[in-house]
Amino acid sequence: MGDTNSFRMTTKELAKLYQTTPRTIHRWKADGAPIHDEPSMREWISAVRNRDSHDETAACRNAEADNARSSELLSRLDDTICALRIHFYAQKRLHGETLELFNSVKQGVVRLADHCGAVLVNR
């Protein structure tokens, strides 16, 4: 198969050979895969799978870091809301619409923290 002048397999035949779909063969062709050179193609497939595995691992690490940053930011936001609430309460300005606003924002932060899996101290 490595000889470029040899018989060229159809997309269907290539899909059967590499145990995939014709659509994947077309995609691989567009990506520049050596689809008519079986030994090179086996190496190419292995390299792509290895690259994808590393990409997934990196994505998991990035997601964990994003979750940690989200938790920290939500915690800081929650602390700020609590500090403002105490400040307004001390000045006897925390009533009516202002109180409703603080409660509403606090509920939003709690819901967002629950969604992100963040732990809030001032619950």
Image (cartoon, grey):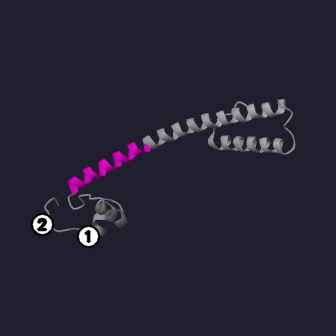
Quadrant including the N terminus? bottom left
Tag shown at residue 83: none
Residue 79 counted in the magenta span: no
Q: Residue at x 14, y 63 (%)?
A: 4
Q: Which residue is mark 2?
A: 5
Q: Position of residue 66 (x, y in %)?
A: 53, 39
Q: Is residue 64 left or right of residue 75?
A: left
Helix, strand or loop under label 1: loop
Q: Which residue is mark 1?
A: 10
Q: Residue at x 74, y 31 (%)?
A: 83
Q: Residue at x 30, y 59 (%)?
A: 31
Label 1 near label 2: C-beta < 8 Å?
no
Residue 57 occupies quadrant? top left
- Number of marks in the rendered image: 2
Q: Is residue 113 left or right of residue 8?
A: right
Q: Position of residue 100 (x, y in %)?
A: 82, 44
Q: Position of residue 17 (x, y in %)?
A: 28, 61
Up-down: is 9 above or below 49?
below
Task: Say which of 104 and 93 sits in front.
Answer: 93
Q: Earlier in the sequence, mark 2 or mark 1?
A: 2
Amino acid type shown at disc 2: Asn
Which region is colored magenta? 38-56
> Magenta stretch mostly in which secondary structure?
helix
**Dot 2 crowding, Cα within 10 Å, few <14, some 14–19, many 20+:** few
Task: Say which of 14 and 27 sits in front.
Answer: 27
Helix, strand or loop under label 2: loop
Residue 44 counted in the magenta span: yes
Quadrant including the C terminus? top right
